[in-house]
Amino acid sequence: MSGLLEGAKNLVTKGTDIGERLEGLSAATDAATGRLDDATVDGARGVVERAAGRLKLSSEHTVVGIAGATGSGKSSTFNALTGLELSAVGVRRPTTSWATACVWGAEGARELLEWLGIPERHQTTRDSMLDTRREGHELDGVVLLDLPDHDSTEVSHHLEVDRLVGLADMLIWVLDPQKYADAAIHDRYLQPLRTHDDIMVVVLNHIDRVPEERRESMVADVRRLLDNDGLQKVPVIPVSAKLGWGVQELKAEIARRVSAKKANKQRLEADIRSAAARLDEASGHGRPRSLSKGRVEALDDAFAEAAGVPTVVDAVERSTKTRAARATGWPLVSWVSALRPDPLKRLHLDLGAEGRQLAGRSRTSMPQASAVERSRVEAEVRALADEAGEGLGAPWQEAIRRASVSRMGDLSDRLDAAVGSVDLGVRRLPAWASLVRVLQWLLIVCAVGGLAWTVLLALSGTLSDDSTPKVAGFALPLVLLVGGVALGIVLALLCRVLVIGTARARAAAAEHRLRSAVGQVSRELVVDPIEQELSAYTALRQGLAKALK
Amino acid sequence: MTSPAPGDAADSTRMVTALVRLHHALQDVALPLDIADAPAQRQARATMIDQLEDYVIPRMMTIDAPLLAVVGGSTGAGKSTLVNSLVGTRVTAPGILRPTTRSPVLVHHPDDGKWFGQDRLLPEFERVDHATNDPGALQLVPSDLLKPGLAILDAPDVDSVEEQNRLLAAELLAAGDLWIFVTSAARYADQVPWEFLKLAAERSTAVAVVLDRTPADAVQTVATHLARMLASRGLKDSPLFIVHEGTVSEDGLLPSSYVAEVRGWLDMLADDAAARHAVVTQTLDGAVRALAFDVHAVADAASGQAEAAHRLRADADMAYDEAVSAIMAATEDGTLLRGEVLARWQEFVGTGELLKSLENRVGKLRDRVVGAIKGKPQQAERVTTAVQGGLELLILEQAEAAAERAERAWQMTEAGRGLLAQGPADLGRASRALRARAERSVRDWQQDVLDMVRQEGQDKRTTAKFLAYGVNGLGVSLMIVVFASSAGLTGAEFGIAGGTAVLGQKLLEAVFGDQAVRRLALRARQALESRVRALLEDERVRYTGLVDALVIDEEAPARLRQAARRVDDARFATQRPDLGAGLGFDES
């Protein structure tokens, strides 16, 4: 379709008003596909295709269709206009079974007739005949179609009429005194075509059969019915095709419209307008909007909770605390904490580089989101979709809702993968911890040295001798022993405070990284699909604005 | 006409009874859902009721009434002019402007007036004696120019742009013993009139076709073609009359010679009682046969409606049952005990770490728990709040999901789409009041649980243990036990949820004994389930209420079919009187 449209645009309508409208309708139709109901979208697409097809063909010609009930005198009118006995006229109903065409000025009309589906044997070219009756060129460029009836028992005729009524650039409806109030013509054709009043003319044929004093009131009555149909702008021309009354007037009316060379554009414009109006009505008139930040944040929070981010953050804090405390604690007792399991290992979040390579993207052992957490996620998704769809038409709200949950099936996998892939930053010990560790061991060495020295001196009985070095009145070995132990314990206690601080900082950093990973998931699974719908809606509105301007 | 045999009267009564029953059965059948053939069958049902009231039942009761010929046809074919010319005086106003005839006119012989009173044919039409535009009126015109035994009714056009005219025409034609169908050279191949003629052929209604307003030079061709069309459409026995186009007199009459043929035929019918009776019987029998046959299509449609309604209800039920079981499953599998509820519970009984390491030594722990409960009563409150928040969220979300599922299921069926369009716009969402009601329900349930504990503890009120834990603490413990009461609970998830519940359970058992705890947990659970059910029931009613409001009688189709069979039986009995007794026709 777009190929057809491209071709059309390049040919004749580039930059023109009708081309713009068509482009707008085409864009709106694409945006509406799968979102509005199929019948409306297909109707609009049909209009786009038909208009593109017509615009590619001769704009020098105007296709004028003569339509009406059986026996109203379509063929007589056709013959009166062409001045030739082209169409069979008869009393047997229905007389005309196929459309006949008469072309004034054949140049470029061949493709047009082919497009209309009129076989060559039903075509006549007015200037190709040895035509002696010169009558001017007022109808040059007219392709006059004599259509079959729309109300006889032959259903195939109705289908042909419906098809050609959709294609003709201008329509002449032939009524007659007997049939002008039939429901068949008013309900099925005239009223539905009220958007096309610019391109229609109504002819009241057989006026010669009406007593002269009643003619005026009959024309007035036809006028009344047309007004009821919403066709105030359509002229009514009383005609007698048999006697030739009013034929010149009709011809002049056709000529007037044809010479303007606007009829085909007007018709397409009317088609585009009514298709666009239908799309517009189905879509609702709300202004396209963007998602509010607060709502998206609330969604991210719900996702983070469902992903178990608080659990992981808690584990990071405790794990860091355990590891750092083991490193900086007093070496003689800190090994005890190694007996306690590392919370992160428990969650399978800390496999190490090699472990991760081996396991690939295996699942973590994070608990599955609970019913409450899942409910919270769903409630937030629904709230977000509601907010996005506020003020839009029901089909769009439905489309947004559908899009918002379209990828929710992946939710737990994606969340798990997101949490599993985040570097929690707990593998490396902080630099100061290594220093403290060295210091602790030095202090231990100190204390052990002091102890050995003290024991040696005590055995040799020289502990209290003056030869023993003294510090502030105490024997150095003792000072080393007691100081080493005391300092080690004090240092361990001091480091505890630091460890808590570090653990908190690391937990906060991990939380930040986890949240951004989870935020990406929520963006991909929920926000992006919703925004896609919203941008489709924006595209539709823009297209419709172009088509309806 | 031969006087009716005694058997005929009985048959006729039997037939009338059967028809009246059919009429009742038809009135009982409603086709409110918009499924595939509903609009057509709704129309068919209305037509059948009208025909029974207007024609079949009154006609069956007064089989000797004059023959009623209805003149119908297209707008502009010259019906009124024809009627006037047939009667020989101007009784109805022809017009040049279409559509012309509005209120129908019935012309009859003065002696036949008694047959056309208000209670006879077409009882809904008010009888008037002057011309009017009121389509609900029937103008009666007595005229000496018409022979007794035959009346003529001038109907509006069948294809008018005025919908009311079309409906009126169809109704009047359905009430005629004989159709005089008027068409013209320009009209005779029109689709709409032929649909009526097709109907007449199907019902073997007596039809005479008048080709009116035909120019002399076209008569031969048109008449031949029309005759062929009639023959090919099953009306080859219908007489075809030709009325030439001629100048109309001041009074709007055609020269009498133009209509002599039609008039002669009608006079002949009026004079010949046997022929008249044959025409009436043919049309009436055809109408009854068609009715008895067509009723089955209506009955099928009614069964379809009942089925569709059943399905809609089942769809809504399924959506909400799923929601109830999802909520109950979520409260059962212990997942509710994670997150907020767990954190508050742990705060309540002490730190998680400690609990884990000590959970097997409940005895020692209990003291600590007791301290927690006694020392910080506001913490029990916090657990309650957390439980409430979790449950509420769960219920709301499941109600939303159920509404969405129900709407989607309905959206997939034609009937459902129609109902959704009629119902409130926000049917696809949980009702607005649900949040408030869910809040209250959960609170009420918590109150239930506390009441249960209080009641259970009545005789233990004075025991030290009960006093120590307090109603609130025990109530909270019971809630926690309820949420973990299923056997499926695994301690693998940190062993916390299970451990937590075990603690609560031990605590309660220590107070009430394990038998009582099991009973309490079960009762609390049932109370929760019934509250959730009641809550979602109100939501479900928003859907099922729409279906219930339609009042679809599931028995109606069967009654309708039976009534149709009775009519058929009566018809056979009338046609074969010798078999009538043998059929064992049951009057009950």
Image: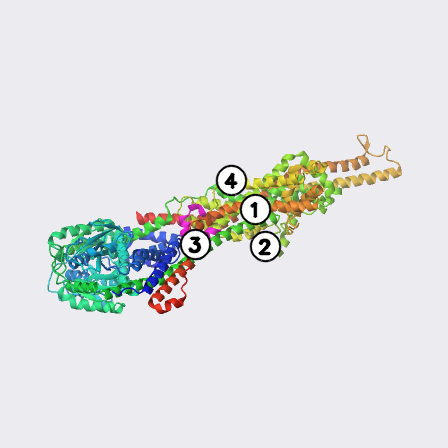
* x, y percent for residue A427: 64, 47
Mark on residue B436? 4
Outermost front residue: B6
Disc 3 marks a residue whose amino acid type is Asp
Answer left or right for A243 relative to B155: left
Whether the magenta-drawn stretch holds residue B427 is answered as yes
Q: How is the image coloured?
A: rainbow
Name the residue carrying label 1. Answer: B530
Chain letter of mark 1 equals B
Query: Are tags 3 and 4 found on a single chain?
Result: yes
* x, y percent for residue A489: 74, 37
Answer left or right for A314 relative to B95: right
Look at the numbered discs 1 and 3 and tell me whether their residues touch, using CB distance below 8 Å: no
Task: Tell me which label, 1 or 3, sits earlier in the chain.
Answer: 1
Q: How many residues crowd mark 2 within 10 Å: few (<14), some (14–19), many (20+)?
A: few
Chain letter of mark 3 equals B
